[in-house]
Amino acid sequence: MEVSLYEVGPRDGLQNEKEIIPTSLKTELIERLVSSGLKKIETTSFVHPKWIPQLADASDVLHQIKRKNGIVYSALVPNMRGLERALESGLTEIAVFMSASETHNKKNINKSIAETYPVLREVVEAALAKNIKVRGYVSTAFGCPYEGEVSPAAVIQVTEELLRMGVYEVSIGDTIGVGHPRQVKEAFTALIGQCGAERIAGHFHDTRGMGLANVYAALEAGVRTFDSSIGGLGGCPYAPGASGNISTEDVTYMLHAMGITTGVNLNELVKTGEFMEQVLGRPLPSKVLAAMKSKQKGGENENEYTGC
Amino acid sequence: MEVSLYEVGPRDGLQNEKEIIPTSLKTELIERLVSSGLKKIETTSFVHPKWIPQLADASDVLHQIKRKNGIVYSALVPNMRGLERALESGLTEIAVFMSASETHNKKNINKSIAETYPVLREVVEAALAKNIKVRGYVSTAFGCPYEGEVSPAAVIQVTEELLRMGVYEVSIGDTIGVGHPRQVKEAFTALIGQCGAERIAGHFHDTRGMGLANVYAALEAGVRTFDSSIGGLGGCPYAPGASGNISTEDVTYMLHAMGITTGVNLNELVKTGEFMEQVLGRPLPSKVLAAMKSKQKGGENENEYTGC
């Protein structure tokens, strides 16, 4: 079996960092991720710098990366103005986003779900007209910080609307890390039954330690694409231990252990995770990073056992 | 559905701490765990203090706890000398242990697996003669630091031998945290088919972040008893982030979210985790502890959503 990993650390991770990372280190991170075998990377966001100053250098990052053939470099785009900036950066793929819950969508985008559709439709149609692929994100798909549990029906409705616009894949996000394996298995079984496995990706946060349990439950439901973040970057830098996205190292370790191929070199990934720890000056949440970095002796040793 | 949690923090957790915790704080921890709704607690170990000085006060701990009716207070016992000390402490349950892999058993117990059986049989028979229940542990059941992957056949052989001695339940331990969900589901399905679900418990370590994924996989295989440790105590204090047992808070949160009852009060558990963080002077690995402790406003708020 093969699973595709979509690396979101440079965007979903770095947008949550207190400090602003120098552009040159962001491009080095992206190039190291590519060297680790990752084929799809969300590099930055064209949300207005007023909202996310950490990613104000989006255009510079994209102009300074040494791009490699066959690699998808994507970026988040909220509206037409963001799309214009993305087009100037020579992107071949972008991502649009909205929430499955009204209140979170309103607080995040300042529009109701119904008001959001035409805004995203305009972006998607303009991008497709320029032969740019568009990915979709549905946030708070399992729980909303304001409304509590979110129903699969609400998620399916938003997902189908995005697919009708021409989005090629929708990433279903457990934004606040409250989804549990039973809920995840049920929701993805329904989503895949309705939309097809090739159109659905899983985006989990490890805020309550259920990240990999949810990946396993989603795998059982037929999901074959997962978003993850190097080192488990992201989450809340103000809440120690409260991590963000599932770590690319951890999900890669688990998939490889289960005999699933990803095309990723775990040892290179761990070195990239160590690089980010040096850049940020703190340990990152990834457990595999913590377990393997001290063991690295070079060479393929991802199956090495440690007594700890 | 109901799941039983076996708290091993005071033993499996504290035996891995650099510093030695004062006896009064150990007894306070045990009493707080009981107040949190946990019914079965492994309080300490009667392994010779030369090997585990952190638990040299085993007898004092057991004499100083204010015991409550209906609560199982257990302790680890390696041999007849340990059993004598356990008997003096008025225990009603003990636990014996060995490994599923020859090399780890040899390094841990200094005997081959075959040489270990008669030693444990003598302890089990002497305990049963005193109406003391005996639990069994099988270590390195999924991977050995010296031999690599361990076969289900080897685990079943040791497990059946322990059950034949008169052990009422065998806890199958992923000592070094390398087991993955597919392996766990296959191994527990085989074990339960051979020995019965009521005789098998799951003991997972979160060293590589797969702890809760393995709990979910074991639940699917029919396991209904899991060992866990308050805060995720244990593991390697010298390797930051490399955690030990799965955290009692995290597994409780996931089980409750899935509609499974445990009898545990998660808010009390989180307060107990915070108490241990204060005792040790560092944050513990539990993700739910990190996510909930800052949110505690008293009252039942385990379903509160956080924006992080």
Image: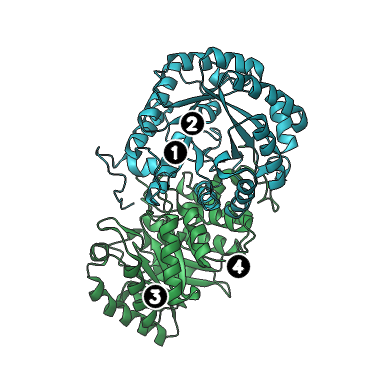
Chain colours: A green, B cyan
Residue at 47 percent across and 76 percent down: it is A196
User: Residue B191 location, x and y as percent?
Assistant: 63, 46
Q: Are marks 1 and 4 in contact (CB under 8 Å)?
A: no
Identified by mark 1, the residue type is Thr
CA separation, marks 2 and 1? Answer: 9 Å
| Disc nearest the viewer among 1 and 3 | 1
CA separation, marks 3 and 4? Answer: 31 Å
- In which chain is the residue bearing label 1? B
Residue neighbourhood size for the residue with mark 1, other residues' Cα within 10 Å, grouped as few (<14), some (14–19), many (≥20): many
User: Which mark is drawn over residue B9?
Assistant: 2
Q: Are marks 1 and 4 on the same chain?
A: no
Of mark 2 and mark 1, the one earlier in the sequence is 2
User: Which mark is drawn over residue A2?
Assistant: 4
Identified by mark 2, the residue type is Gly
- In which chain is the residue bearing label 4? A
The residue beneath circle 1 is B248
Dot 1 falls on a residue whose secondary structure is helix
Against B95, residue A155 (above or below) is below
CA separation, marks 1 and 4? Answer: 33 Å
- In which chain is the residue bearing label 2? B
Residue neighbourhood size for the residue with mark 4, other residues' Cα within 10 Å, grouped as few (<14), some (14–19), many (≥20): few
CA separation, marks 1 and 3? Answer: 46 Å
The residue beneath circle 3 is A86
Asked if residue B290 lies left or right of residue A103, the reply is right
Asked if residue B257 lies left or right of residue A222, the reply is left
Of mark 3 and mark 4, the one earlier in the sequence is 4
Identified by mark 3, the residue type is Ala
